[in-house]
Image (cartoon, helix red, strand yellow):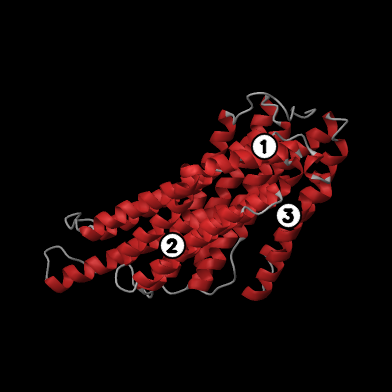
Amino acid sequence: MEGRDPHEEGRAATPLELLYDLTFVVAVGVAAENFAELVTAGHWALGLLGFVFGMWSILIAWINFSWFASAFDTDDWIYRLCTMVQMVGVVMVALGILPMFHSLEAHEHFDMRLIVFGYVVMRVGLVAQWLRVARESAEFRSVGRRNALLILLAQVGWVVVAFLPLDLLPIFVLIAILGLVELAIPPVAQGSAAGTPWHRHHIAERYGLFAIIALGEGVVGTVASSRGAIGGVTGNDWSTDAVLVLVAGVGLTFGMWWTYFTIPFGELLHHRPARGYVFGYGHIPIFMAIAGTGAGLHGAGLFLEAQTEARHAAEGAEGAGEAAHELAVSDVGLALTVVIPVALFLIAIQLLIAGIAGRVDKIQLAVHLGTLAILAVAVYVAHSSMPWALMLVMVATFVPVVRFESGGHLHRDRMLESLASE
């Protein structure tokens, strides 16, 4: 573990990294689905708390592994077994998200014990890796030791908080403090972003792959919303609304994907490696927004399914049953569960580019303001039609795409040339 070459040609994600990422698919899905269910039940605040904490737990685990792998992946048998241990911990975290949401819904003591136990297991593997660095690399010996020590101390804090019999407010104050401690570990342990030999294009590819995992929730949400629009389990109610929801869900997910991948993060990091922390942590709200959009689509599905079942019951349709969920949210409220995360996604993308490049693209800023205006109109349209509101949200995500494909890519190339010359 002497450290990988940060300028290695052709560096790409390994099969082991792709396998590791699969453990997060279920975790993101559970967080999004439970968020949608709490929101449709009228528990906005509790749902948001659970979703943010669940996604935070997922993302910190993924970030810790990905940056270490980019810098020190040896792919020997010890490294592989330590990765397997971390995968076991991540699966435990995924299993702990559901009881965490249930404890919020039941207004019981906040139950994050299984999530914390998962972190204990996961960090056995991670700390073992850092201790290998401390033993085998003269250059990064102190970095390895500091990381191992600080991670262990933070984990002790999480274990203590998990068993404290406190109310929700003080628990989340302590969680916020420990969350800041987690963010501070890399800068304290290794100093600048160049404190470990991570690979610029490799880490950009890894973040792109996780973005696709989060976008998968948009596909899942589309299936859920389309199913609700076509009549639940009967599937015999194809209508204009059903077609609109299907097109909007797929198009919205595709538009977010296209928008994200127009940004040359690898090149930006190549020219601005000192902004590694900005890139790494700046993606946290982006990933949450992407997964939150999928949750919003799922919530729209629950809403449409309830409407369809109610209509069938009123018509006395054969086989009609009661709505699967008792919903306590309006059309506008459901529209906001999609509009807000999409708006957050677009704003966070713009801020991240500015944070890495060190400059604000005024033209792109104007484009994003235009998309936000379309999103505001979508909320108004939701008063009369949820499916058409979703279609407007989809259109909003394609505004930056149209700008890019109609000449924005030339502006991007000039920006990269300017960064290269500085």
Dot 2 or dot 3: first in sequence order is 3
Tell me the mark number nearer the camera, choosing from 2 and 1. Answer: 1
Q: Residues within 10 Å of mark 1 (few under 14, many from 20)?
A: few
* Depth order, front residue of 395/161: 395
Q: How many marks?
A: 3
Q: Residues under labels 2 and 1: Cα distance?
A: 36 Å
Q: Amino acid at mark 1?
A: Glu
* Amino acid type of the residue that numbered disc 3 sits on in the rendered structure: Leu
The answer to whether the residues at label 2 and label 3 have Cβ atoms under 8 Å apart is: no
Q: CA distance from mark 3 to mark 1?
A: 32 Å
* Position in image of residue 31 (x %, y %): 50, 57
Gap in angstroms between the C-alphas marked 2 and 3: 28 Å
User: Looking at the picture, which amino acid does disc 2 mark?
Assistant: Val
Mark 3 or 1, closer to the camera = 1
Q: Which residue is mark 1?
A: 417
Q: Which residue is mark 3?
A: 183
How packed mark 3 is, by other alpha carbons closer than 10 Å (few <14, some 14-19, many 20 or more), is: few
